[in-house]
Amino acid sequence: PFLAPVDPVALRIPDYPSVVKIPMDLGTIRRKLQGGEYGRKEEIRADLELTMTNAMRYNPPGHPVHEAASQLLDSVRRRWAALFEGPR
């Protein structure tokens, strides 16, 4: 999960677009990075967080995708703070 856009048809989850209004995935983030589409690092963080919060919004707690997204979100936030926000 997370590497490519969610395909609601292939995954047979037709309600996905009604739950997740702004889709995002790591492949899209990579493409945007390579294309110079981000003007500020905060935009990258926002898309990283959006990827994970979308997965957590659609998949209920306890679901493997929800749990993986939660762990990855925690990791992103910790690493971001270490890289850009300094010690607390």
Image (spheres, rainbow, N blue to C red):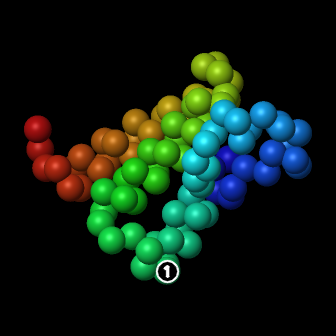
Question: Does residue 65 appear anywhere in the picture?
Answer: no
Would residue 33 appear left or right of 24 to someone viewing this image? left
Q: Mark 1 packing: few (<14 Cα in 10 Å), some, or many (20+)?
A: few
Q: Residue at x 79, y 51 (%)?
A: 7
Nearer the observer, 20 or 48: 20
Amino acid type indicated by mark 1: Gly
Image check: 36 left or right of 85? Answer: right
Q: Please state the horizontal and vertical placement of residue 29, each as a whole percent of the image.
A: 52, 63
In depth, the one of 38 and 80 nearer the eye is 38
Q: Quadrant of residue 49?
A: top left
Is 80 on the left-hand or right-hand side of 16? left
Q: Secondary structure at mark 1?
A: loop
Q: Is residue 17 above or below residue 84?
A: above
Left or right: residue 16 versus residue 42 is right
Q: Nearer the viewer, residue 5 or 22?
A: 22
Residue 53 visible to the viewer: yes
Vertical side of 63 occupied by 11: above or below:
below
- Give the residue at the far bottom of this rendering: 35
Work out which quarter of the rendered image holds the C terminus and state it.
top left
